[in-house]
Every structure is written in structure tokens, then in C-alpha cells.
Amino acid sequence: MALLGRTANGLFWMFRYIERAENMARLVDAGLRISLTNLSGETDEWESILVSAGVERAYREKHGDYDPDLIIDFLVRDQDNPSSVRSSFDTARMNGRMVRTALTRELWEAINESYLVIKSVLASKLDHRSLPRVLDLVKHRCALIRGSFHGTMLRNEIFDFCQLGASLERADNTARILDVKYWVLLPEHSSIGSALDNFQWTSILRSVAAHRSYAWEYDGNYTAPNIIDFLMLNRRMPRSLGHCYGVIGDALSYLDRNRPEPAPSDELVRDVSNRLSSVTVRQVLNNGLHEFLERFIIDNNRVAQQIAADFRFYPDAPANTDGSQIQTQSA
């Protein structure tokens, strides 16, 4: 079957925003865990969350000073922030309604019910005691949607566009969560290799649900190079950059079967995938982790923009390759 551009666009962005809701919850969870080790009273880790999420400018325009409670509210509940958990569920459901006939009943019900639950829970401000429970609820609801998707959807073009959206968003988020750790370390390099440093790295693993799988893969040897390797280059880890680009490449290959020649985005994906396959974690660290992640985020956004152009999501929209902000859906 051949999908109209607007249908492909709706599917792509529906799953980008479902993934974004979970990823934003995980990013806040990472900040919350790292803040537990902060004895200075400074808000560096929360500033780093805003920077890595790509919404620092929007937050400062609304609130000015860095206040942990305001930052958490901005990332979780604020509907003026199009990437907040609440806004992401709103936009995912809106796109789901637009492509309702392309979804199974089970998938649509999972999306709609999750939207209603999250809307109710986030109707009022959260306190610090309830925040972990709410973040877990967001993760569980997104897992329910993902399970309905994988368990009931036909493996056709609809499935492929959903996979593209989810995997691009997931890769972006993993890179940003790793960048949070970079920003937290930046002011105080003396802590590198310390017990505090190792605790922060294991907190990053827990925030992406990778703590136990990491222990299986690396025999419980918690070191920064191994953790970076796991989250960036290990293709057996479902949230790693390498795994996500394997899924993206497969989805584009399936979609290319109905095209006279491969889409231009296919070449961009191969370039990113080859870079991830050929580099070692030691090379990344020697050349700069932040610089590698920054380039990856920009290239990942470029891939998403090219996919939109190749499959005519927005026929009249200009390309935007700026990686400084999280991509949001065009109206």
C-alpha cells in the first residue's frame, strides 16, 4: 500500500511524541537521581537537563532563574513547552486521531486511555514525594502503547513509519541523557573515577532501564568507558545509538522497496550508522564525548528532516538542520 504524506507524517510524529513523553520522564529521572549526590545546593544538574533537552531558552524566557521545582514542572506538566510529558501525550493523541483508521483497535485504545490517565495525573502540580511514582507511570503507559503496537500491528508501511519516528526520537534522547552526564562533570573534573562519579554513571543506566542488562553484558564492571560503549555503540542494547540506527536503516530499506531508487535519507542513515560502527569508545573520549554527541544530535535531526522531505510530510516546508533544539512537529 502507498501512504499519503500526511498519513505517514501522522504516524511518524505520533510515535515520536509517545517516545518523547517517556524520554522526557527518563531525563527528569536522570536529573533527580544525580541531584541526590549534590551537596553544594547548586542547580547545575537541572540546568544541564534543560540544556540537554534543548529547551533552556524557552524555560528562561518564561521563568528566568533556575529553580528545580519550576524546571520539573516545565519539563513534565507545562503545556507552553511542546516537549513536556503532558504536551507530548496531547500531540501523540491528536496525531493518533488523525490516522485512526491506520491503527488497530488495541493500539488506539492504549493511546487514548494513556492520554486520559496522564492528563488526570498531571492536572495539578507535583510534589517531590509523588514525582518518582508519576515518572514510573509515564514509563509504564508508554510501554503499554509499545506492547500494543508490536503485538497487533501488521508489518507494513504503517509499521515502518512508526518505527522511524520512535527510533529517531529514542536515539536523540539517549545522546541527550549522556550529554547530561558530560555537563554535570564539566565543572568538577576531580570527581572523575571517584565513587561519586561511578554512582552518577550507574544512575544514568537506571534512568534508561539499562542497569541489569549492562551488568549481564559487562559482568558488573561499572566504568565510564564501558557505560558509554553500551549506550552508544552496543547494538544489542535497544536504547543505544547503534541499535536505533539499525532499526532506522531496516525501516527505510523496507520503505525503499516501493520506490524506483533509494531515498536520499538512506545515504544519510548509512553515513551515521557507519560512523557508529567504525568508531571506538576510546576514540570518542579522546576526541571529546560532548563534541561527538553534539554532532550526532545535529545529524539525527538532519536525517529526520530528510525523511520528511523524501516522503512528502510537509511539501512546502523548508529544511531545518539546526540541532540545538528538540524538533517539534510543524503545524
Image: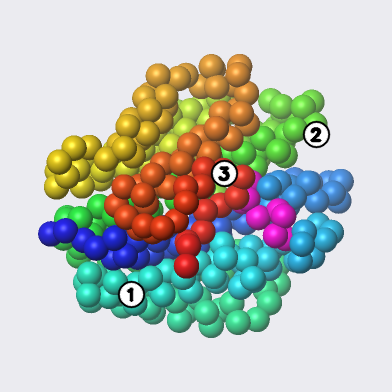
Q: Which residue is mark 3?
A: 322
Closer to the camera: disc 3 or disc 2? 3
Q: Indicate the position of residue 23 as horizontal and vertical percent values.
A: 51, 55
Chain part drawn in magenta: 52-59
Number of the front mark, 1 or 2: 1
Question: Magenta stretch: dominant SS?
Answer: helix
In primary-sequence order, the first of circles 1 and 2 is 1
Q: Earlier in the sequence, mark 3 or mark 1?
A: 1
In this figure, which residue is indicated by the disc labeled 1?
98
**Image coordinates for residue 223, horizontal then vertical, percent:** 57, 27
Q: Nearer the viewer, mark 3 or mark 1?
A: 3
Residue 187 badge: 2
| Tag 2 secondary structure | loop
How many neighbours does mark 1 have within 10 angstroms: few (below 14), some (14-19), or many (20 or more)? Answer: some
Asked if 211 appears above or below 18 in the picture, the reply is: above
Q: In 3D space, how far apart are the residues under numbered discs 1 and 2 (Cα atoms)?
A: 46 Å
